[in-house]
């Protein structure tokens, strides 16, 4: 996942304080006023708030204007109003600009709201600066059929980012369950439709991307029988990942590289839906039963709701690579 796309959320900081007014201070250079802002990358905006997964690595970036050499900021993390950590970080100059910055990794293993505060206390060289707090909700990591809300929306976004075919409704429906199954197959996890803590931990680490076996121009399909998935690829980029059920040990799916030579829309007498044939009677087709293990007579079964999209993608002459 590859890893998930970086999300940039910016919070403006408020400048506090003013130069001292004592006679001694009047003779010394006044502290430099300025502004500080922070942003959190890796969190996901959701209906006006930030969300993330427990254990997910987030990156806090702070920007100080203007830059004054030798200054530091303090970043504090709070959970339920209680401070859980404080970190003093150096402010470094951005080359070519009168601007400073700092970068800090932020993570928390526990669900709940995390509040991030950053500040710079006044000293002889720079005035006080206090950031407007950033708040991120670390979501409890379990979802199944019927679940809904921010955790499911986050799950669907992460799966979609890795090219699993998933709705974006915020409801854990059958389409989400199929995407979860495909993800678990690709990552070698137990083949269930539960999005549990182990799966969310894998997502938090950026795991789940499918790496094509070979490189070739144009559009093609890969069928990985060991992981029981069918993957649509265009210009060497994964476009969609689906679960499949291939042939049993008694009626195995053929292995090798083939070209699609025939396509039959609709449902035939054998219950095959939108069939794309690649050799003999072997085809990718929709079917009413697609268990998480090999169960077909040799074809590559896919869920009926996915059959039309695959049928539309495949063109006569396109290559399919079938391997274990």
Image: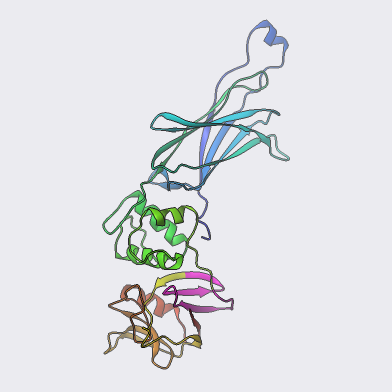
Determine whether, in the image, residue 117 is placed left or right of residue 176: right
Residue 188, percent across and down? 44, 66
Which colouring convention does the figure follow?
Answer: rainbow
Magenta-drawn segment: 213-239
Q: Would residue 75 appear left or right of 178 to someone viewing this image? A: right
Q: Is residue 236 magenta?
A: yes
Residue 119 image offset from top left, x and y in percent:
55, 28
In this view, the residue in front, 98 or 192, is 192
Q: Residue furthest front?
A: 249
Depth order, front residue of 120/142: 142
Number of callouts in the render? 0
Q: Is residue 180 above or below residue 265?
A: above
The stretch drawn in magenta includes residue 170: no
Whether residue 176 sits left or right of residue 11 in the image: it is left
**Residue beneath the point at 44% across and 43% down:** 109
Q: Residue furthest bottom?
A: 280
Q: Is residue 14 shown above or below 40?
A: above
Q: Quadrant of residue 254?
A: bottom left
Image location of residue 129, percent across then percent down: 57, 26
Locate residue 138: give its quadrant.
top left
Which residue is nearer to you in this view: 283 or 14? Answer: 283
Q: Give how far across and how far down residue 208 sits, in percent.
A: 47, 62
Q: Is residue 114 above or below residue 140?
A: above
């Amino acid at each position: 996942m590859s890893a998930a796309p970086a999300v940039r959320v910016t919070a403006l900081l408020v400048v506090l304080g003013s130069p001292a007014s004592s006679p001694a201070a009047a003779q010394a250079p006044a502290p430099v006023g300025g502004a500080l802002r922070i942003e959190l990358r890796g969190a996901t905006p959701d209906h006006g708030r930030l969300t993330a997964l427990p254990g997910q690595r987030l990156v806090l970036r702070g920007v100080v204007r203007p830059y004054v050499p030798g200054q530091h900021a303090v970043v504090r993390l709070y959970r339920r109003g209680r401070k859980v950590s404080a970190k003093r970080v150096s402010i470094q100059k951005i080359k070519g600009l009168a601007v400073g910055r700092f970068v800090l990794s932020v993570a928390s293993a526990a669900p709940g709201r995390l509040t991030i505060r950053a500040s710079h206390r006044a000293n002889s060289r720079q005035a006080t600066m206090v950031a407007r707090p950033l708040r991120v909700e670390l979501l409890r990591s379990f979802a199944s059929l019927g679940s809904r809300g921010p955790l499911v929306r986050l799950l669907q976004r992460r799966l979609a980012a890795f090219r699993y075919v998933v709705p974006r409704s915020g409801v854990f429906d059958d389409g989400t369950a199929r995407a979860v199954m495909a993800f678990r197959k690709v990552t070698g996890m137990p083949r269930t439709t539960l999005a549990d803590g182990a799966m969310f931990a894998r997502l938090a680490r950026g795991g789940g991307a499918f790496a094509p076996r070979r490189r070739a121009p144009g559009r093609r399909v890969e069928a990985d029988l060991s992981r029981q998935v069918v993957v649509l690829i265009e210009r060497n980029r994964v476009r969609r990942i689906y679960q499949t059920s291939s042939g049993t040990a008694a009626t195995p799916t053929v292995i090798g590289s083939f070209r699609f030579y025939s396509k039959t829309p609709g449902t035939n007498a054998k219950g095959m839906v939108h069939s794309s044939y690649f050799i003999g009677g072997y085809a990718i087709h929709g079917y009413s039963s697609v268990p998480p293990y090999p169960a077909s007579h040799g074809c590559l079964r896919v869920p009926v709701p996915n059959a039309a999209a695959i049928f539309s993608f495949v063109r006569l002459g396109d290559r399919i690579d079938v391997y274990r």
